[in-house]
Image (spheres, grey):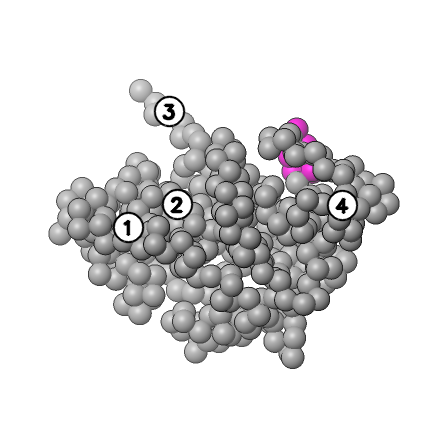
Amino acid sequence: MEAAPIQGHTARLPWPFPDDLSAFRYSVNVEPGRSPHRTAAGQWGAHIVDLGGEEYGAIMAERRRILDADPQRLKMMPGMMPAAWDLLLYYLRDLSLSYPAIMSLEEDGDRFHWRNRALGTDQAFVLGDLDSLPYDPMTFLGREIPDDLLLVKERDGKLHFDAGLVTFAAAWSVSFDVGMSMYEIHSPVPRMNRERITARAEQFLSHLPADQVYRRVNWTLSASGSRKLDVSLEELPEWGTDIAELVRDKDWGRLQLRIEVEHFIRLPMTGAVTFNIRTHMSSLEEIKRIPAWRDQLATVVLELPEDLAAYKGFLDYRQDAMAWLTDGSAS
């Protein structure tokens, strides 16, 4: 009997490795955005924003909960408000074209009317008028889409992370990182600055054309043993013991592969550059059901040099976890 097609979350998962990849190293691995990718389980990548299918409502409910409880998840350096409006308008226009059945944007000069039928949003606003929105433009956009929103701007000849709305960070804090240069942000990452990967990334972003969208995919094993997206430093007490308990119980199927799709866009009105992050999670239990993914992930994780495995946080347990993944028994 032919196997049933894979559906739902796994079918949409942006698998982070090319089919022939067996060894991972950090690089400026960018590719054009809005280009669909076939995977062993389905397809992803047709749009800039992946709403998440049937999970969209739950993801946005969690994001709104975090923003209501902690408005400090938005940080903005002086002078970044025009770029925030630019970001809002760019994304609302893109969403209305990508998802016309549930989203629309009407335009009349500097007056706009946004409708998101999936979330019940019905909002008229005037571009540049803060009083016409219930929130600032970055927060308003962040309450409509699953992506964390970051804006970078050139200052003193270097790119700086000068504005962000971040609810789903992976063991970092928007409050701590805002205002930093790319070199400062990436200094904890092994080899990034030393091997000039950061320099090449900064050069790429500095010369990013205004009429093209690019993306890259990053990955790690999550610091949480659930699909919890918010493993930020702000919520450390909520997840800080997850992995220790998972390792103690050898509950490897609950371990999560965390995948981040990052989009890079030069905004048309201000020239600011977006660095937006959409986070996806898949448990080893789910990955084990896709033989090609199971075998490739084990190969990549076990081959990774110790400094990179330590930075990603799984050096001490990767042998046991990958043994479970590939043959069902820990070593």
Question: The disc labelled 1 sits on which kind of residue?
Answer: Asp
Magenta-highlighted residues: 96-101
- Classify 7 as above or below 161: above
Label 3: which secondary element: loop
Measured in 3D between alpha carbons, the distance from the residue under mark 2 to the one under mark 4, in whole angstroms, is 33 Å
Residue 64 left/right relative to 90: left
**CB under 8 Å between discs 3 and 4:** no
Label 2: which secondary element: loop
- Classify 236 as above or below 116: below
Rendering coords of residue 220 (x, y %)? 37, 55
Mark 3, residue position: 4
Sooner in the amino-acid sequence: mark 3 or mark 1: 3
Are there few (<14), some (14-19), or many (20+) residues within 10 Å of tag 1?
some
Circle 2 or circle 4, nearest the eye: 4
Question: The disc labelled 3 sits on which kind of residue?
Answer: Ala
Question: The disc labelled 4 sits on which kind of residue?
Answer: Ser
Q: Which mark is residue 132?
A: 4
Mark 2, residue position: 228
Mark 1, residue position: 242
Circle 3 or circle 2, nearest the eye: 2
**CB under 8 Å between discs 1 and 4:** no
Q: 46 or 67, which is in the foreground?
A: 67
Q: Residue at x 65, y 79 (%)?
A: 156
- Classify 243 as above or below 187: above
Measured in 3D between alpha carbons, the distance from the residue under mark 1 to the one under mark 4, in whole angstroms, is 42 Å
**CB under 8 Å between discs 3 and 2:** no
Q: 168 or 25, which is in the foreground?
A: 168
